[in-house]
């Protein structure tokens, strides 16, 4: 069984990003970049399926600027076998990414695609569902438990009310939630080995996909700041203030 | 032309997030059509028809809509798109599961989590865990949108007299099968709709200790929430999680107990009207957003708080 896993290069989750002075976008020129945390979980799940003997090959894909190669090297160091970079300097929105991945799925014929449920930069939470739609595949989003056997996947999903379990025949698409697994750190020997693993680069045009953005960013701004409050001396004062000042209880 | 809203329901009753989504729809058009896809869902459909501002309810009743499977719902919605300029769903786990699929089938972008409507094609949505607000304009013919419920007031549950019309179900895709669900049962208000939320974090230390918050929540008729740390540690189930990738809440009063205040948690609650933080670490970032901070050991402060609330 072959697994395709997608990884996005995003501003590290610890970075507090700033809006550019002209409001045209977010300034990520000099910030630390990392693999999207949900995508780390996706890679980890693929590697675990391979370690358990359920998968034979893992192909990692990233889409974006040349530096996404670093993100792919991380995926390779975690255990992916080879990597594909769809290189583009255009802003790639979820629909365009889904179409590019659809083209790669047609070439690679994976049995399973695993993706992060959401990228922590644009917070869209769309691409996996879109790819599943384009492929007319079953989808299991927000997965917290995955088992794959005999051409079937059984996936437990985190939903607003609790948990839901679905089953589906492969090929299928899964997006990961936080509690699916705890991703491993790449070890130094594996980082060295990853440098020798194959990494292929393709252009969106070669995949026959029009990546023109459908959404135009008019402006970005910081939300109004919350004013700092006060420190109360004790519980009695807290309750007094909630009753008489804030009037919320 | 009109706006189509995909209702969220359990066949019997509507989920409150649908009410906020109807409010958003009403800002776009006077014609608001609500689609109730379910099985034996007449109860939910009747409730939808009574919501103020709803002009028509479409009901698709079939066994394969008994559970909201994304494949079947998306295939149904695309058969009904004609005559609608916008298709809206609440930005809940269900709406987020279905709407990108709808958008891809229509070959349009999906706009996630809108918090404001500037015009028929321009919307405001948070990015980077709510640290940035982006104003985006859609160039697509149909706008497929998920609505962050905290951005729009709930439409009144009564006052509407919409007509109810049955629509033909789309064929069962057969792609996924529902196996089971474990829904957390609680008599407390729904987390995303509660007027008061009491949330616990890593500082509680264990699932048993977390129970210290229950009498407080009961006293205040509050919902219980949690930080990611508390959920990851297994103190409480996943559906308690408030934050960037969990639930987004904006109650009148949010009481954060033993929560340090990582930006990912703040993303889920910083639009609350009044925030109270109880934490023994005076340096915890939660105090920077709290209206009232109490630097104290929560295991003393919470029982004290209960006692104090009993006093007139």
Image (cartoon, coloured by chain):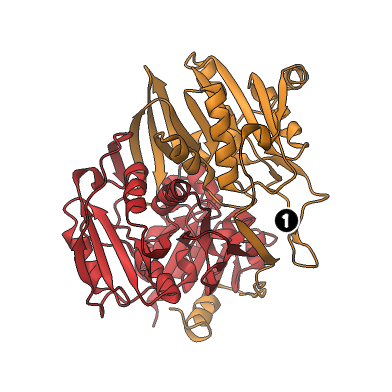
Q: In the figure, is residue B206 to the left or right of A24? A: left
Q: Which of B69 and B208 lies nearest the eye of the viewer? A: B69
Q: Residue lying farthest right?
A: A30
Q: Residues within 10 Å of mark 1 (few under 14, many from 20)?
A: few
Horizontal side of B89 relative to B61 (left or right) equals right
As drawn, B187 above or below A207: below
Question: Is A185 situated above or below B2?
Answer: above
The answer to which image quadrant residue B268 occupies is bottom right
Name the residue carrying label 1. Answer: A16
State whether residue A27 appears in this view: yes
Chain A: give its colour. Answer: orange
Q: Position of residue A18 (x, y in %)?
A: 75, 60
Q: Quadrant of the C terminus of chain A?
A: bottom left
Q: Residue at x 35, y 74 (%)?
A: B31
Residue B133 % position (x, y): 64, 65
Q: How many marks?
A: 1
Q: Residue at x 19, y 50 (%)?
A: B39
A179 left or right of B38 in image: right
- B271 or B146, nearer to the observer: B146
* x and y, in percent, of residue A106 in the image: 53, 27
Q: Nearer the viewer, residue A188 or B211?
A: A188
Position of residue B178 measured from the top left corner of the image (x, y, whole percent):
29, 37
User: Left or right: B227 with respect to B186?
Assistant: right
**Which shade is chain B?**
red
Q: Chain of mark 1?
A: A
Task: Look at the numbered disc 1 and give the secondary structure of its residue.
Answer: loop
Residue positioned 32% across, 56% down in the render: B80
């Amino acid at each position: 069984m072959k697994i395709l896993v997608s990884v996005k290069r995003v501003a590290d989750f610890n970075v507090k990003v700033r809006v550019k002075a002209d409001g045209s976008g977010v300034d990520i020129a000099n910030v630390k970049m990392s693999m999207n945390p949900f995508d780390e979980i996706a890679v980890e799940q693929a590697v675990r399926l391979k370690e358990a003997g359920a998968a034979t090959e893992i192909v990692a894909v990233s889409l974006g600027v040349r530096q996404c190669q670093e993100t792919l090297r991380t995926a390779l160091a975690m255990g992916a076998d080879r990597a594909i970079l769809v290189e583009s300097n255009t802003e790639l929105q979820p629909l365009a990414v889904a179409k590019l991945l659809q083209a790669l799925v047609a070439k690679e014929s994976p049995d399973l695609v695993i993706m992060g449920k959401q990228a922590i930069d644009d917070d869209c939470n769309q691409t996996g569902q879109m790819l599943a739609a384009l492929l007319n595949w079953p989808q299991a989003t927000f997965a917290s438990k995955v088992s794959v056997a005999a051409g079937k996947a059984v996936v437990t999903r985190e939903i607003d009310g609790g948990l839901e379990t679905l089953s589906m025949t492969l090929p299928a698409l899964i997006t990961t939630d936080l509690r699916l697994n705890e991703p491993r750190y790449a070890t130094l020997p594996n980082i060295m080995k990853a440098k020798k693993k194959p990494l292929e680069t393709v252009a969106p045009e070669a995949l026959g996909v029009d990546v023109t953005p459908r959404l135009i960013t008019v402006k970005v701004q910081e939300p109004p700041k919350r004013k700092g409050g006060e420190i109360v001396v004790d519980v009695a004062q807290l309750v007094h203030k909630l009753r008489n000042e804030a009037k919320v209880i | 032309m009109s706006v189509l809203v995909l209702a969220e329901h359990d066949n019997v009753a509507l989920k409150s997030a649908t009410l906020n989504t109807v409010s958003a729809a009403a800002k776009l058009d006077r014609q608001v059509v609500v689609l109730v896809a379910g099985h034996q869902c007449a109860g939910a459909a009747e409730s939808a028809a009574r919501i103020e501002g709803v002009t028509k309810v479409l009901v698709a009743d079939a066994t394969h809509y008994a559970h909201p499977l994304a494949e079947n719902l998306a295939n149904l919605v695309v058969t009904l798109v004609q005559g609608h300029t916008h298709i809206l769903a609440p930005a809940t786990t269900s709406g987020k599961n279905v709407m990108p699929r709808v958008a891809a089938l229509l070959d349009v972008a999906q706009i996630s989590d809108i918090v404001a409507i500037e015009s028929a094609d321009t919307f405001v949505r948070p990015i980077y865990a709510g640290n940035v607000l982006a104003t985006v304009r859609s160039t697509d013919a149909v706008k497929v949108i998920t609505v962050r419920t905290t951005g729009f007031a709930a439409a009144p549950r009564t006052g509407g007299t919409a007509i109810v019309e049955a629509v033909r179900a789309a064929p069962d895709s057969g792609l996924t099968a529902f196996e089971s669900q474990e829904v957390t049962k609680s008599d407390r208000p729904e987390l995303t709709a509660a007027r008061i939320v009491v949330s616990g974090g890593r500082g509680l230390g264990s699932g048993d200790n977390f129970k210290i918050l229950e009498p407080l929540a009961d006293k205040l008729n509050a919902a219980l929430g949690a930080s990611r740390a508390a959920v990851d540690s297994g103190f409480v189930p996943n559906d308690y999680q408030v934050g960037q990738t969990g639930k987004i809440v904006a109650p009148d009063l949010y009481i954060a107990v033993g929560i340090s205040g990582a930006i990912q948690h703040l993303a889920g609650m910083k639009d609350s009207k009044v925030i109270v933080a109880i934490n023994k670490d005076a340096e915890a970032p939660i105090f920077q957003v709290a209206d009232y901070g109490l630097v104290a050991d929560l295991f003393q402060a919470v029982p004290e708080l209960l006692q104090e609330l009993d006093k007139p």
